[in-house]
Amino acid sequence: MKKHLFLLLSLSLLLSCEPENSAESLSGNALGTTYNIKYFSEKELEIEAALDSIFNIINASMSTYQDDSHISRINNGDTSIVVDKHFVKVFKASQKIYKESEGYFDPTVGNLVNAYGFGPEKLLEQPEQAYLDSLHGLVGFDKLQLDANNRLIKAKSGIYIDFNAIAKGYAIDVIAEYFDENNVSDYLIELGGELVAKGRNKQKDSDWIVAIDDPEQKAGERTFQTILALKDRAMATSGNYRKFITDSSGNTFVHTINPLTGRAEKTDLLSASVLAENCTLADGYASAFMAMGFEKAVALLKKLDNVDAYFIFVNKGTPEVYASEGFKKALRD
């Protein structure tokens, strides 16, 4: 349940000539994707060292691509691991969304993610249904618990945990926390398409302006569905329009796995963009909505506090748009 990229329009703008309004910008690669950050600060920050530290800590805790990470060792059967505070926070956020979504968001789909070729190992051929069914028996976030010493207890030893649908959002929240602790009140953080915006773009004297990709754009194109202004909110999007796998026989699988059926299923949602108080929740809810489909996603959205969404869905073969009232207020097109 990976996420798809927003284009940060504000990052493509030229810097202001006025020193007091000039922004610091940096970009790079981390957590298997790219990041772009823009901020305004009156003091010099050791931002690159801070980012390196944050990314290393997140990888050491939750990267399924790193053999010695806490999550990899737990997935490989090590029961002695005492997980760190970051793992605990993501676990509890996942538990919350799992319950609210009635199981449509479930990081224990890790075995199925791997079987379909969306994990560290790439798909070579279509997995057999009997094999997929056996892996589906290992799905269920309610089969996990943290004990008083922060050791993870599994009801079934073969359960494989994959936090990739929420960990990038959490990493952005940790970066935002670093800025807040250093009294930086105006910044925009983007990592793999997920966003946190705080304050304003002082260089343009405006809110931070970002765009949502058009899910029907053709390969090589970069067109936008809409633009919006963000202030003091997080935003994440999920969709199937770019992320899919084709095996050696030509079978194509979308990356959204329905935890209730164990199948890589395409719903009537083309993309789900979510605004929330932090990016951890926005990331998780976007993934849950994609697995649920449009009607169930809208029903859940109406039950959530301080969460807004923009859905692009297919109705009788025609793409349509649904935006919650809070999301409409942010739109600028």
Image (cartoon, rainbow, N blue to C red):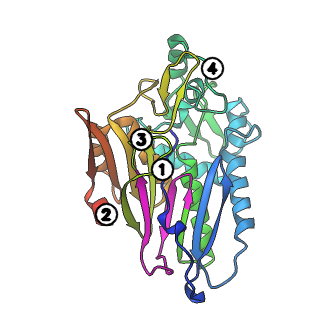
Tell me, yes or no, whether the two marked residues, 1 and 2, touch with CB atoms within 8 Å.
no
Work out whether 288 lies above or below 47.
Answer: above
**In magenta segment, residue 193:** yes
Which class describes the residues within 10 Å of circle 3: few (<14), some (14-19), or many (20+)?
A: many
Nearer the observer: mark 3 or 2; the answer is 2
| 219 left or right of 120 in image | left
* Residue located at (28% from left, 61% from top): 328
Please state the horizontal and vertical placement of residue 241, each as a whole percent of the image. 44, 39
Q: Position of residue 144 (x, y in %)?
A: 56, 35
Residue furthest left in the image: 316
Q: Give the number of the mark in front: 4 or 2.
A: 2
Query: Horizontally, is 17 left or right of 285 in the view?
Result: right
Q: Is residue 203 magenta?
A: yes
Mark closer to the observer (4, 1): 4
Residue in the image at 59% along x and 79% along y: 183
Residue with the mark numbered 3 = 288
* Residue carrying label 2: 333
**32 to 139, vertically: above or below:** below
Comes first in the chain, label 4 or label 1: 4
Secondary structure under tag 2 reads: loop
Instruction: Say which label, 3 or 1, has the lower sequence index.
Output: 1
Identify the amino acid type marked 2: Asp
Disc 3 marks a residue whose amino acid type is Ala
Residue 247 appears in the picture as rendered: yes
Q: Position of residue 166 (x, y in %)?
A: 53, 47
For the residues labelled 4 and 1, the Cα–Cα distance comes to 29 Å
Which of marks 4 and 3 precedes in the sequence? 4
Front residue (pair 146, 216): 216
Q: Which residue is mark 1?
A: 283
Residue at mark 4:
124
Q: Secondary structure at mark 4?
A: loop
140 sits left or right of 41 in the view: left
